[in-house]
Amino acid sequence: MAERPARGGVVKVVLSPDLTHAQHAAVRAFCDASPGYSYLQDPDWPDVMQGEGGRHSYRHVLVERDAGGLAAYGVLRLSPVPGGLALGAFRRGPVVAAPADLEPVLRVLLPALRNAGLITVAMNPRWEDAEAETVEQVLARLGGQVAPPARQRLHSCTGLIDLAPVPEEIFAACTAHARRNLRKLDKLGLTLRPVADGAEMVRVRDWTEAFARARDLTTRGLPGLEAQRDWIARHGGALVMVEAEGAPVGAFSLLRDGPRLLNMSNGWADPDARLPRSYLVYWYAIRRWAGNAEPDGPRWLDLAGRDDPRVPRSDAGAEGRERFKDGFPQRHVVLPRMHRFVLRPLLARALDGVERLRAQGQRSKVTAPR
């Protein structure tokens, strides 16, 4: 459990497109010390995402105490709507030092966001298990409503593989099916190396986009490869090329998320090739970082989502992904679901009505006879 720090009252909310050097240093220290940290709430994340274009913009949100120091920090993603207003989201945020800090922070922050022109704001601070339950209780008490399944775009359960044991111990704890697939990798004679500059980056980007299309996945909201490589240089991770018999056949990225490691993107020359791709990605991470192989390396390999009975899914591929993830020893973790606060009710109802009509129109197109 995170301890409750000494505190003064919350007196000031600052929204800014940029941070001064001193602010960045203070935010970095605050986020690094919080068990509620997420890469999506890192002060470097807006710089990573701003270069990706799209309809979103970002603001740094600092909630300051009267006694000095920060009570909270957040990366606020803004989606503009006509009239100079916006919809906001703290994805995996905002960050506080302890769940007990969240309620006094939100009592000051929510009115400030309304005054800044937000119609709604969504949030799901990243805390685990009992603390996640506490966070959800706070959000509900202050008027937050659990977003419907279609709006739960960030997983609310996951599995964490402990990287403290050596790779051989992790391998022994895998299921027999997983061990068979991991053994196959050694027989394939694959070479794994860092992705080079220039044409190789272009090739990997093309593979990644083609793989997403083939699997009906979206890359919206993900940083591009150049941005991922910049993140890896600052925070850790790997951008890896896979070669078979000297020829490049695929690539994947792993990004550091505080004490965790996440598989961010994958691209393959042949999306339908019979290659145990997911096993390859996770086995690379286990072999490279398990057993404290690198100083200050990640402690956990995040499986980036497990089924959550609270959030029904209709994803045809979910069953296969769950079987794959079941093959690894892991700690199951429950996270807060996305909650939405309505700050301007009349405008929010109008926008919700427009969205319902748009969704009905899309369903009509799908089901219309040909």
Image (spheres, helix red, strand yellow):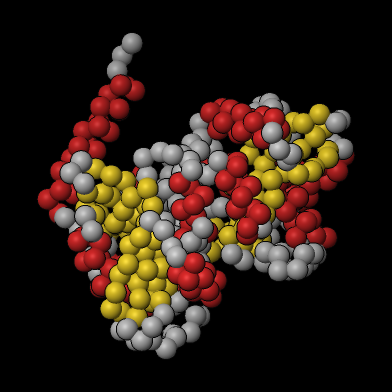
In this view, the residue farthest toward the bottom is: 6
Give coordinates of residue 9: x percent, y percent. Answer: 30, 84
Left or right: 17 in relation to 218 = left
- Quadrant in which residue 321 is drawn: top right
Left or right: 165 in relation to 263 = right
In this view, the residue farthest toward the left is: 346
Residue 326 visible: no
Left or right: 96 in relation to 327 = left
Give coordinates of residue 155: x percent, y percent. Answer: 47, 53
Give coordinates of residue 342: x percent, y percent. Answer: 21, 57
Residue at the spot 21% in from the left edge and 33% down from the top edge: 357
> Viewer-proximal residue, 205 or 300?
205
Q: 217 above or below 237?
A: above
Q: For the C terminus, give its image quadrant.
A: top left
> Viewer-proximal residue, 233 or 283?
233
Give coordinates of residue 334: x percent, y percent. Answer: 48, 63
Residue at the spot 44% in from the left edge and 85% down from the top edge: 4
Residue 142 visible: yes
Left or right: 213 in relation to 292 = left
Residue at the spot 18% in from the left edge and 44% down from the top edge: 83
Residue at the spot 71% in from the left edge and 69% down from the top edge: 296
Q: 342 above or below 206?
A: below
